[in-house]
Structure formats: structure tokens, C-alpha cells
Amino acid sequence: MNRMSSFLLGIVFGVVSLYGAMHYYVVHSSDGFHMIARISPKLSNPYVDVRKFTAADWQKNNELAMASLRANKGKMVQEPTANFQGPIQQAVSHATVMINDKANLANW
């Protein structure tokens, strides 16, 4: 391969890579890698690791969250919020038990 064809192949590879980085997110989630189409093309955060994202992180990256939902990958967005539901449900059930215990003691 001569120098000119190597140069042209490098330009084509660069253009294709730049197009992919501007139009897609590469997302690493708990179930593997995903390519998610961006809502608006820009060259920011081409790779995002969402395995340890919290609800606050999703709120900061709302464009990624909307693109994930649009690509039917909403499970990635819902996983961190599920972590909050467990402690809240435990606190509510504990409070309900305490209220019921006090009501039962008052009726006894």
C-alpha cells in the first residue's frame, strides 16, 4: 500500500469515526455495551459508563436519559431509581408496623 492510499484510508476512517462519535453514544451498562443514537449531534461524551449512575447522574445527563428511553433502553435509567425504592419501601413498611402496633396496644 503506497503512502497516498494509506493517507486516504486514514481520512475515511477518521471521518467515519467522527460521524459515529457525533451521532451515537457508546454506553457501558450492567448488561453490556449499547450504541444509542443521540437526540442532537454533538461531540461530547462519546463513551458513558452508566453502571454506577445514580438518579442525580441521570438528571445531569438528561439528554442521554432521553436518548436511552427513545431507543427502548429505559431499563438502564430505571435501575438506579429502583435502588431508592427499596429503602423507602422498608421505611414505610416499618412505620406502618409501628403505627399498627401502637393502635393494637391502645385497643388492648
Image (tube, rainbow, N blue to C red):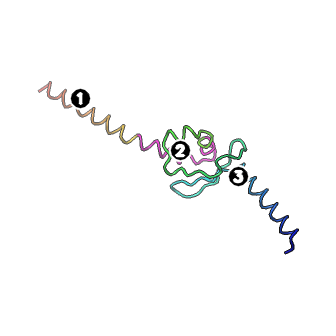
Q: Would residue 5 appear left or right of 59 to someone viewing this image? A: right
**Residue 66, quarter of picture:** top right
- Identified by mark 2, the residue type is Val
Q: Is residue 43 above or below residue 103?
A: below
Q: Are marks 3 and 1 in contact (CB under 8 Å)?
A: no
Which tag, 1 or 2, sits closer to the chain's start? 2
Q: Which residue is mark 1?
A: 99
Q: Which residue is painted at 56% across and 55% down in the image?
A: 28
- Identified by mark 1, the residue type is Ile
The residue furthest bottom is 1
Q: Is residue 35 above or below residue 7?
A: above
* C-alpha separation, residue under disc 3 versus residue under disc 1: 55 Å
Residue 89 has which mark?
A: none
Q: Is residue 101 above or below residue 23?
A: above
Q: Which residue is mark 2?
A: 77
Residue 82: image location, x then y, percent = 44, 43
Judged from the image, the secondary structure of the residue bearing numbered disc 1 is helix
The crowding category of the residue bearing disc 1, from other C-alpha atoms within 10 Å (few below 14, some 14 to 19, many at least 20), is few
Judged from the image, the secondary structure of the residue bearing numbered disc 3 is helix
Q: Which residue is painted at 80% across and 63% down in the image?
A: 10
* C-alpha separation, residue under disc 3 versus residue under disc 2: 21 Å
The part of the chain drawn in magenta is 66-84
Q: Which residue is mark 3?
A: 21
The crowding category of the residue bearing disc 2, from other C-alpha atoms within 10 Å (few below 14, some 14 to 19, many at least 20), is many
